[in-house]
Amino acid sequence: MVFKVLATATAILLATAGQVAARSVPLLIGAYTGGTNKGITLYRFDDRTGQISAVPVQVMPSENPSWLVLSADHRRLYAVNENGDGRRDPVGRVTAWRIDPATGRMALLNRVSSLGADPTYASLSRDGRYLFVANYSGSADPGGTLAVVPVAADGTLRPVTQIKTHRASMANPQRQASPHVHSVVSSPDGRFVFAQDLGADRIYVYRYDPAQRELPLSALGDQPFVDLPAGSGPRHLVFSADGRHAYATLEMAGQVAVFDQAQGHLTLRQTLSLAPADFRGAVGAAALHLSPDGRFLAATDRGTDNALVTYALSAADGSLRLVDRHATSGSEPREFAFSPDGRFVVVANQRSHAVVVFRRDPASGVVGDMVQSLPVDQASNLTFVAP
């Protein structure tokens, strides 16, 4: 009887090990298409070994799909087409794709104009009814805007119904002569929308009211924007799961800012430099994300630093404490993503044309050895299509 139980247990363990070994997660990588890259590429990621499939599963031709957004059910993908002056297509656009939940394969739904140049970011409203698009606009005229794109029940996109414009700070005449909206993010409760404007040195705050179908965004009356230090250049924003705290990268200053958030109001609590105190090179804060368990925040610093910096979040007040700095083994780490279980982190090194996988300790947040460097021309954004 004992031997039978042991044999059964061994069989279960072997079957489980086989399942783990066979498990793969779809990984989508968006890229700039001025070189050899054709657009969005679907790979398979082995979440046991951390290896990305060397051969793509599918390539979806698309012009400069530099930012990817998944719907809540992972059955739709939205990609900004970062087109503008000097590109093969001078018109900024947004594209919708249908995702097969079993295979991760994609099929084109439709494409609309973003009514702006160089869209660099998009996010869905919490109810999935609108896509908020950040038209960065590299040129001063007309400058960057926030565009509101309705999403139909079948996932297709409708023409832009609302445009929001801001005022430039002019603190840096070369980079801030006009507004440059770099990201648009909803609060976890979905009631407020925050637009990070690098050209304005401000975070603009809007109320979201889906009952106003054509004009769902209106300025928060008593705090329509949050001023940040001149020349700091806010880029991306994320919220803690409970919505009490927000974290932003200040691109031009190479910093991470920590805010308290209540009813749409942001209060600056802490500012930290990504580079070491004695660093004298160029900085450029870029991506930031919370770990899957919400205990850590990581951000990339570009320029000549090229590092992934990890902080622990205080459970008491949301403040940050440095726990790790790790070289990204490449140039211009534009974006990164944690694997669904948090045991790996995947970095898109845009200018060295590679996507690099590192081991990561979920308990400590520390990034470890490189697992793989996969050649990908001008990789810009990546996302796991995982339940």
Image (spheres, rainbow, N blue to C red):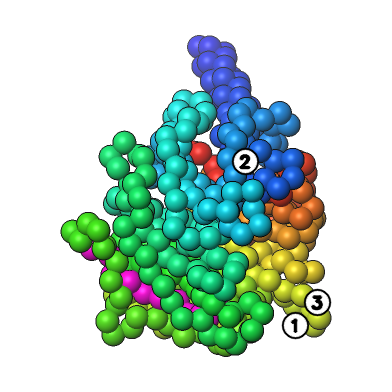
Residue 190 % position (x, y): 31, 61
Please tell me which residue is depicted at 53% across the width and 12% down the height of the picture. 4
Q: Which residue is mark 1?
A: 277
Disc with the residue nearer the chain's start (2 vs 3) = 2
Q: Which residue is mark 3?
A: 281
Q: Please tell me whether mark 1 or mark 2 is closer to you in this view.
A: 2
Q: Residues within 10 Å of mark 2 (few under 14, many from 20)?
A: many
Q: Is residue 386 left or right of residue 299?
A: left
Q: Nearer the viewer, residue 148 or 381?
A: 148
Residue type marked 1: Ala
Magenta region: 199-209
Please tell me which residue is depicted at 46% across the width and 37% down the height of the picture. 97
Image quarter (top left, top right, bottom left or bottom right) of the C terminus = top left
Disc with the residue nearer the chain's start (1 vs 2) = 2
Residue 253 tag number: none
Residue type marked 3: Gly
Q: Quadrant of residue 271?
A: bottom right
Q: Nearer the viewer, residue 236 or 22?
A: 236
Residue 330 % position (x, y): 79, 56
Q: Which residue is mark 2?
A: 39
Q: Nearer the viewer, residue 281 or 204?
A: 204
How far is the residue under mark 3 from the one under mark 1? 11 Å
Q: Residues within 10 Å of mark 1 (few under 14, many from 20)?
A: few
Residue type marked 2: Gly
**Pointers 3 and 1 in contact (CB under 8 A)?**
no
Q: Is residue 219 left or right of residue 101?
A: left
